[in-house]
Amino acid sequence: MELDDFSLGKQFVHIADARVAYVDHGDGSPVLLLHGCPFSSFVWRNVIQTLGEAGHRCLAPDLLGLGDTETPPNADWSLPAQLATVMGLLDAFHLERVDVVGHDHGGAIAQLLAANHPERINRLVLCNAEAYDNWPSGDERPFVVATQLPVLGALFRLALSSPTTFKLILTAAKAVKDRSVLTDELVAGYVRANLSDPHKRAKTARFLTGQLDPKNNRCTLDAIDGLRRFDHPTLLLWGSEDTHFGPEWADRLAADIPGFHRTELLPTGHLLMEEAPERVSKLLADFLAPAA
């Protein structure tokens, strides 16, 4: 599948055994943007453009097992391994402290970072995040399980490589409230990242195996004690119509994070940065603006 302009701009850096793909855009105060599952840094393309114009340096990696990041066979892609890679990325770029924005699985990684390495974060933004014991959600679990079935799982993943089928699945999975945002450009970018060839489909299948691993799921519960000591400014930016991780999870996080600043609810589904890119970008730019 032909590379889109966003993906053509990716660079690569070796962190331990991983060849991490990332986008580095803009100048100014650094912002680390962590995407969810099974997506890639492509989800941040519109936000990155606006934050760059607002005076931020946006660093958006593809997570282990997703997008254009590559690892040796059987490498660890668990949440602790994702955290170690993020730490390695910050060290590679000599970034002592950054603002962090995490969505979905990236939000889970951001929570581990806040809980275990708060000294590396200036301000934290969590968006419709995997947290506590809420993932995979009841609505998404059947789709994840379907990718793991013998024989049928491979056929299901192959079917998902069709943009038409993938758009239907995004709709059925209620990834967005407004289906008109599922443009050809958006769907092609999502398919290219994780489903466009046998290698990417195999990676996605293995990554989704980790979504069903109780030991991996436990990591977000284990992070709560650390989060309860995290007193840095924290914004919860949440799509209120998300059937997977609804506003009740934002409320629970707000009660547990001492640095909680405020919650912003947007009338979107799970992919709030796709449904309301201008509003999301404006809220992030305002919250992350350097203190006068």
Image (cartoon, rainbow, N blue to C red):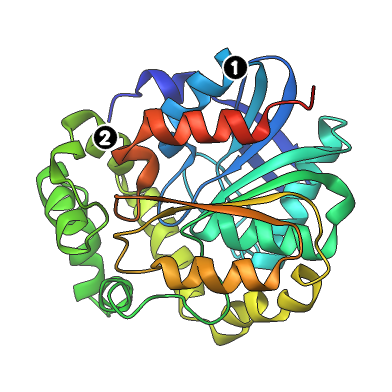
User: Relative to 270, is 215 above or below?
Assistant: below
Is residue 163 shown left or right of residue 271?
Answer: left
* Numbered mark located on residue 248 in the image: none
Q: Is residue 143 left or right of residue 109?
A: left
Read off the residue under disc 2: 186
Quick one: label 1 or label 2, which is nearer the N terminus? Answer: 1
Residue 119 pos. (x, y %): 89, 50
| Horizontal and vertical percent position of residue 103 | 51, 52
Q: Is residue 61 above or below residue 48?
A: below
- Compared across the picture, whether 179 is left or right of 57 comes to left
Q: Are marks 1 and 2 in contact (CB under 8 Å)?
A: no
Residue 46: where, in percent of width, then height?
Answer: 42, 26
Between 141 and 150, the residue placed more toward the observer is: 141
Image position, residue 248 (x, y; %): 45, 73
Relative depth, front residue between 252 and 168: 252
- Residue found 19% across the figure and 74% down from its top: 152
Q: Which residue is label 1 attached to?
A: 54
- What amino acid type is highlighted by mark number 1? Ala
